[in-house]
Image (cartoon, helix red, strand yellow):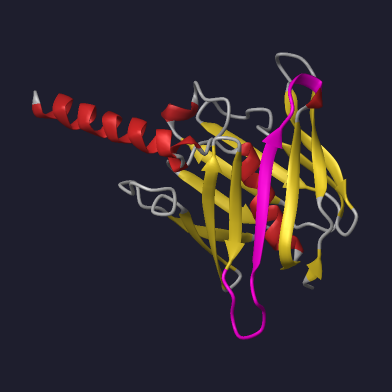
Amino acid sequence: MHTHVTPFDLQAWKEGNRHDYRAGWKGVSPEFGEITLTCPLPRTSPESLVSEVRGGQLPTASFEARGMHVEGMKLPGLNRSTLRVGDRVVYVERNRFGATLEQRALAMRYAGDHYRLTALDKHGYVLSRAADDEDPGVRITVREGGRGKNRRLSVHVDGRAEGGDLSLALVFAGVDRSTLTQLGAVKAGISRVTHFWTESQY
């Protein structure tokens, strides 16, 4: 059911030790209840890194990156990743060669709806669901602010959202989104050129 969502914050949290360390964001949405984002979950394999959001009236969402490249990462990245909301896989596409934030945005398809996730900068992003014949769409802005124990995620929703919209938006707070930013675009471009040059030397 689509509903208006009151702006809310999630607070940073962490617990456990080196062998069972957990951290992420926790808070309460007046409409959807208590929400916990764990990013990442304790590792079950050195080649798998997963962030997960669950709680309240939200369907559980998970973002998993797999491969040797994740061993040194703190958060799952966009390469070789799988995104799920509830029991459905979300289809994700991106233009690795895009020069602008809009061109580098993620295009997603979930439950018959079309979404875009666009970086604002390294601290914030917007998830938008396209309008259709039955609904005018929604725009969810998520931004990290504060420092230390006062770190928080501020969530603001324009339009009427459902649980899947929020789960999809929030799980990306537990993802390395750097390649969606302008600086990330430059770094990715340099990395590709370096890789191609190295390959050409063999």
Please provide percent x and percent y for residue 7. Answer: 81, 52
- Left or right of 67: which side holds 35? right
Please provide percent x and percent y for residue 171. Answer: 65, 46
Q: Is residue 58 above or below residue 131?
A: above
- Left or right of 194: which side holds 67? right
Q: Residue furthest bottom?
A: 133
Observer able to see residue 202: no
Q: Is residue 190 above or below residue 83?
A: above
Confirm whether the magenta stretch covers residue 34.
no
Observer able to see residue 58: yes
Please provide percent x and percent y for residue 19. Answer: 71, 16
Count every numbered label the image shows and give the total.
Answer: 0
**Which region of the structure is painted magenta?**
130-149
- Left or right of 71: which side holds 14? right
Q: Looking at the figure, which quarter contains the C terminus? A: top left
Q: Is residue 92 above or below residue 49?
A: below
Residue under the point 66% across and 84% down: 134
Closer to us: 178 or 201? 178
- Please tell me in which quadrant of the rendered image residue 162 appears: bottom right
Residue under the point 56% across and 42% down: 64
Closer to us: 192 or 143? 143
Q: Residue furthest top?
A: 18
Residue under the point 79% across and 73% down: 1
- Please tell me in which quadrant of the rendered image residue 6 appears: bottom right
Closer to us: 173 or 103? 103
Confirm whether the magenta stretch covers residue 138.
yes
Q: Is residue 43 above or below residue 57?
A: above
Residue under the point 88% across and 46% down: 28
Please provide percent x and percent y for residue 177. Answer: 52, 39
